[in-house]
Image: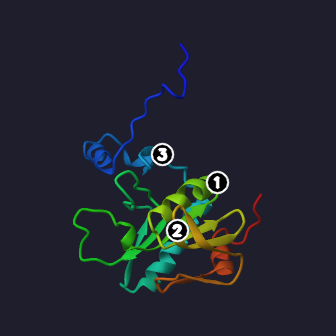
Amino acid sequence: MAVSEETVQRHRWTVAEIHRFIERGAFRPEDRLELIEGELIDMAPIGPEHAECVDELNERFTVQAQRRFRVRVQNPITLSDASEPQPDIALVRRQPALQGQHPSPEDVLLLIEVSDTTGDYDHNVKLPLYARSGISEVWLIDLRQRAIEVYRNPKDDQYTDTVIYSQGEVSAQWVSVAVYVEDLFSSIGNGRDRK
């Protein structure tokens, strides 16, 4: 018997349900899953250049933070009851304690995704999700194009201001951090040619 798309039953998960499963050991840390609009999504494997870029950004932002904000690396951000993505970098407000909670959209000062093989997913799923959640600024580091895409001013499920930097300084709007495009890309991969 053939199953049609209309007869397929899907279970939408909540953040609370997933947290209970994690507490019970149902998922392993190496599973690399994130909850996006109620669906558990397998995250793409992290390649060497992707990892190098995340490490480089983490080092730079940690130096720039001077305890004014916290740098989170590939840790969850709770956007809603049905979405808890794990962005590559999130700069969040310093708080005495989140009391057992992950940061929420109002805690996020800057969110960064590093994109190599996940460009379509980042543009078509993650960016609209972040905009709907009210994340005020998102940077997409495009490893293939050697560029930083900056998205600001969310409205509905899109950002109204978008700028792509292939050179020069990129500064965040709500937190005092900056990156020089050429410097970032020359430090990750030593400027080697990409195939």
What residue sits right under mark 3 in the picture?
Answer: 41
First in residue order: circle 3 vs circle 2: 3
Which residue, as the protein is rendered here, is positioned at the far front? 156
Q: Is residue 166 left or right of residue 93?
A: right
First in residue order: circle 1 vs circle 3: 3
Of 100 and 108, which appears nearest the observer? 108
Q: Position of residue 134 (x, y in %)?
A: 45, 68
User: In the image, what residue occupies the spot 29% across and 43% down?
Assistant: 21
Q: Kindly indicate the quadrant of the structure image that contains residue 106.
A: bottom left
Which residue, as the protein is rendered here, is positioned at the far left? 99
User: Given this view, does label 2 or label 1 mark the residue nearer the observer?
Assistant: 2
User: In the image, what residue occupies the spot 64% across and 54% down?
Assistant: 120
SS category of the residue bearing label 2: strand
SS category of the residue bearing label 1: helix
First in residue order: circle 2 vs circle 1: 1
What residue sits right under mark 1 in the picture?
Answer: 120
| Residue 117 shows up from this direction | no
What residue sits right under mark 2 in the picture?
Answer: 155
User: In the image, what residue occupies the spot 61% across and 54% down?
Assistant: 118
Q: Residues within 10 Å of mark 2 (few under 14, many from 20)?
A: some
Distance, label 2 to label 1, CA atoms, is 20 Å
What amino acid is labelled 3 in the image? Ile
SS category of the residue bearing label 3: strand
Q: Position of residue 181 (x, y in %)?
A: 66, 78
Distance, label 3 to label 2, CA atoms, is 25 Å
Of 16 and 181, which appears nearest the observer? 16
